Image (cartoon, rainbow, N blue to C red):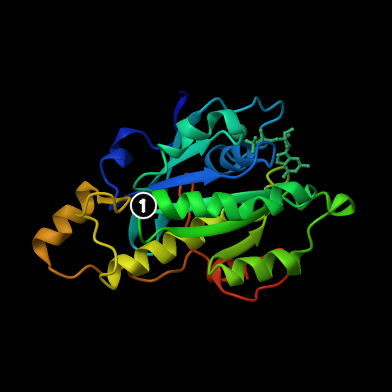
Amino acid sequence: MALDDSDVEGTELLETYDFLLKFIIIGEAGTGKSCLLHQFTQNGFKAHAQHTIGVEFSSRTIKVGEKRIKLQLWDTAGQERFRSVTRSYYRGAAGAILVYDITDRSSFVNLSRWLADAKALASPHLVTVLVGNKSDREDDREVEWSEASRWAHENDIHFIETSSLTGDNVESPFLLAVRAILLSIESGILDPEKAGSGVSYGDRALRRVNSSSRLSFGSLSGGRRRGTVRLKLKDILPGSGRGKCC
Ligand SMILES: Nc1nc2c(ncn2[C@@H]2O[C@H](COP(=O)(O)OP(=O)(O)O)[C@@H](O)[C@H]2O)c(=O)[nH]1
Ligand SMILES: [Mg+2]
């Protein structure tokens, strides 16, 4: 299992996040899951990607409003023979990034199976974002944006198209999911102290909980800094156009 912690500011940051969120990245083999994660954690396209064996782990800490959120990212192999291994990592995930390839219809047709697995095994309040990857290959498109958007709507999940090659939209699925999870915590639907919620408090939040009983997430806006992301409302608001979220 590859251990790739991409917190660029070192151990100090590791100890100062407010929440730790568990995410799984799922979908058919070859859809670009590992490349998507590589873009998100390393800011670059992973050329000559190898097939993922079982499960690989990476992480990144982002900033949303006033909160530092550490994402624990479990990249799963899409191949059938690894299914039983990867399913065991679904347990207690707070967020799922469900990936298909817009140039490969079969990866879209199988989405229901992946979603059913995730719903059955992850946190009961799992937040799922559907990602149509390889949006740079428009000429080879086999799944229309409108069809995928409709499927996402019917299944009550978010949807966005990305390109792990160009980096287009790669941060948006994670930001969308994190924001939805934070709102669930703030409204009391999700309890970070409950086992299996996929969320736990970091040192920073624990200190604040001790001094005040209510958690507030502050302003959800700002700009990107080295190693961190500030939430941009245009990235997360509905109807911001084709290739954006719906
Ligand atoms: N054109 C294009 N190719 C991609 C993109 N993302 C991944 N790939 C290619 O798709 C193949 C599978 O990628 P990989 O990340 O290993 O898929 P995984 O099996 O889902 O983890 C590789 O050859 C990548 O170079 C993308 O956004 N655009
Ligand atoms: Mg992979």
Q: Foreground residue, 240 or 156?
A: 156
From the top left corner, tell me how far across and down residue 196 is, in percent: 28, 49
Amino acid on which the number 1 mark rests in the picture: Ile
Question: What residue is shown at x 33% (from left), y 70% (from top)?
Answer: 218
Q: Is mark 1 within 8 Å of ligand 1?
A: no
Q: Which residue is mark 1?
A: 69
Q: Residue furthest left?
A: 210
In the picture, residue 142 is in which quadrant? bottom right
- Image side of residue 41 versus residue 3, left or right: right
Question: What residue is shown at x 35% (from left), y 54% (from top)?
Answer: 123
Question: What residue is shown at x 70% (from left), y 47% (from top)?
Answer: 107
**Residue 155 shows in the view:** yes
Secondary structure at numbered mark 1: strand
In the picture, residue 132 is in which quadrant? bottom right
From the top left corner, tell me how far across and down residue 145 is, in percent: 75, 65
Look at the image and tell me in which quarter the C terminus lies. Answer: bottom right
